[in-house]
Image (cartoon, rainbow, N blue to C red):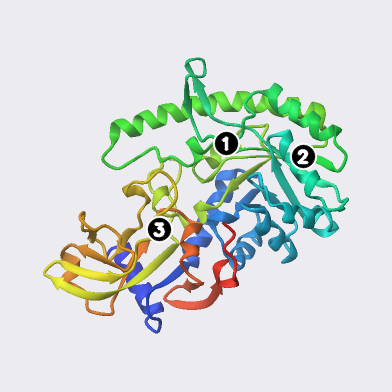
Amino acid sequence: MTARAADRARYDRATAHLDAPLALVDLDAFDANADDLVRRAGGKPVRVASKSVRCRALLERVLAKEGFAGIMSFTLAESLWLARSGFDDILLAYPSADRAGFAELAGDPKLASAVTVMVDDVAQLDLIDAARAGGREVVRVCLELDTSLKLLGGRLRVGARRSPLHSPAQVADVARAVARRPGFRLVGLMAYEGHVAGVGDAVAGRPLRSRAVRLMQAAARRELAERRAAVVRAVRAVAPDLEYVNGGGTGSVQHTAAEDAVTEIAAGSGLYVPRLFDNYTSFTGRPAALFAQPVVRRPGVGVVTVLGGGYPASGAAGPDRLPVPYLPEGLRYDPQEGAGEVQTPLLGSPADDLLIGDKVWFRHAKAGELCERFDVLHLVEGDAVTATVPTYRGEGHTFL
């Protein structure tokens, strides 16, 4: 029996009393992945990206582990909810235009001390000030550095279009604007190198593309390490008591941690290890989050139909954004139908061994987005469900 077949047997036994659709997290794999992130971080604390987890119970579990500290959130409303729930170190990774949220933040000392907001433009400070509604709490601020690699005099850009702040001078200018402004305190700097941390460099069947990605990433790491160090020096000249410099992501943990200028690492997807994180030379994780769909039809030889399953991930549309049939091994989509809203036909010889009501296990393309489809996660240890915990959705929250 292969390791994957053994996992399938475990998951089927653990959930035999549960009807699909359902989602589970294999805690043995989750914990092993967490330990690997800490190992790769080389002694620097790992801040957990909540958008990749979207479950309070699992955030609590990982933050209880040595080597993890703090949350990187994705909306202001989520940040405030987490702070009210007892989390006390929350970095909002994206700028916000949530005026009501800023009024709440500026009016509550507990929230203001727990949450740091992201800024890359003085206009964002204006929005926060206009939204204060009389609240006088000091708002903690983090600046975001654009990590993209610019070549040919800027005519070629590699990397996500995030912050407009690319050079040390640009970041220092905004740092000075924050420092001069009453009601704000600059506490952090963030730089997410998504073109390194979030792009696989060992794509199966694509050796030339994989080599090109590795060459690009090596050049990007060299350029960013030098520029990030210069930016940190420029910002510390304005804010000597800067609390942290955050960088990295699941696919670049050890590379980013090696930079002296970086004080902490961000990671989240590496806990669940969705399918987009299969193609890396820098690490190998264990799939920890899966969902099951029930077989509801057997249209013919080599075909079964499962209920639902059309859960595409965000990003540029393409086959890599679809969930992948994972267990039993050997199933594939019908290219004429793909993953369907209400039903999904699956092809392959394993279909002939599946009966009506059996479970087919899938892996989502991205990590936390799976939790937008399910109210609860069944936590599996060995071959038993040991707990069932709500996702954000299960607690009544869809933040974005």
- Residue drawn at (29%, 67%), measured in percent from left and top? 5
Which label was assigned to residue 162? Answer: 1
* Callout in the foreground (3, 2): 2
* 281 and 188: which is toward the camera: 188
* 301 and 266: which is toward the camera: 301
- Residue drawn at (50%, 40%), measured in percent from left and top? 197
**Which residue carries the number 2 mark?**
126
Q: CA distance from mark 3 to mark 2?
A: 39 Å
Which label was assigned to residue 144? Answer: none
Within 10 Å of disc 2 (Cα), the crowding (few <14, some 14-19, many 20+) is few
Q: In the image, is residue 25 above or below residue 175?
A: below
Which label was assigned to residue 364? Answer: 3
Q: CA distance from mark 2 to mark 1?
A: 20 Å
Q: Secondary structure at mark 1?
A: loop
- Residue drawn at (53%, 77%), measured in percent from left and top? 387
Q: Earlier in the sequence, mark 2 or mark 1?
A: 2
Q: Earlier in the sequence, mark 1 or mark 3?
A: 1
Name the image quarter holding the N terminus.
bottom left
